[in-house]
Amino acid sequence: MSHAYTARPRSQASPAAAVAFDFGTRGGAHRGAVRGGRAAMASESTSALQPGTEASPSTPAVPPVLDAEKLHCYQLALDLQVLCGTLAPMTHRVLREQLERASLSVVCNIAEGAGRRSRKDKRRMYAIARGSTTETAAIVDVLRLRRLAPEGQCRSARLLALRVVQLLTKLDAALA
């Protein structure tokens, strides 16, 4: 069974720039085969790197990206981390530092998992990221209940965290 996950480059908000992933069970598809095939991407990215070759004016050069940057959950985790950096007040250092560590751990573990080659390693890193995401959501709940952060921002952070957990759970299931 295939699931379509989309990733958006942070610099482009256009739906036309979306990259689709197929996490099916056929040869290597679990790694997130890009629509159009890896060979097409490899030829595009290598031609941009070869000396003496220039991109035509009608087609801009596509900069190479890391595997994590293609994942929608990675982009959402980045958004969550940035939002969490604004939530906890400076006067509550322990909560602020713990929220910073937990939200940064989400981003780093997704990136590390995407960079791993084996399914087992990917699943382990995504599971750690899922745990860090739930920890982040718990700290946001504490901030909200203690009225240390604005209700609306806490709600936004909680929704982002929930979506990241959902996407990581789907990734895990697809890799099982």
Image: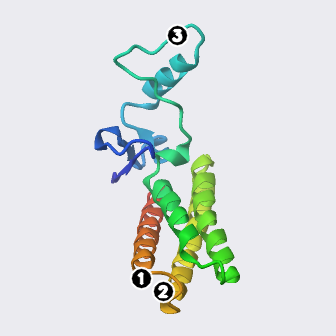
* First-in-chain label (1 vs 3): 3
Residue 26 in picture, x, y percent from top left = 42, 43
Secondary structure beneath label 2:
helix
Label 1 with label 2: CB-CB less than 8 Å: yes
Residue 64 in picture, x, y percent from top left = 53, 32
Q: Nearer the viewer, mark 1 or mark 3?
A: 1
Secondary structure beneath label 1:
helix
Label 2 with label 3: CB-CB less than 8 Å: no
Residue 21 in picture, x, y percent from top left = 39, 45
Residue at coordinates 58% horizontally, 73% vertically from top-left? 131
Q: Quadrant of residue 142?
A: bottom right
Residue at coordinates 42% horizontally, 49% vertically from top-left? 25
Label 1 to label 2: alpha-carbon separation: 6 Å
Label 1 to label 3: alpha-carbon separation: 53 Å
* First-in-chain label (2 vs 3): 3
Residue 171 in picture, x, y percent from top left = 46, 59
Q: Nearer the viewer, residue 41 or 91?
A: 91
Colouring mode (rainbow / by chain / secondary structure / one colour)? rainbow
Secondary structure beneath label 3:
loop
According to the picture, the residue beneath numbered tag 2 turns out to be: 144
According to the picture, the residue beneath numbered tag 1 turns out to be: 151
Q: Amino acid at mark 3?
A: Thr
Q: Sort mark 2 into few (<14), some (14-19) or many (20+) by Cα contacts within 10 Å.
A: some
**Marking on residue 53:** 3
Q: Amino acid at mark 1?
A: Glu
Residue 112's place in the image compared with 27, above or below, is: below
Q: Quadrant of residue 66?
A: top right
Residue at coordinates 49% horizontally, 91% vertically from top-left? 145
Q: Nearer the viewer, residue 29 or 84?
A: 84
Label 2 to label 3: alpha-carbon separation: 55 Å
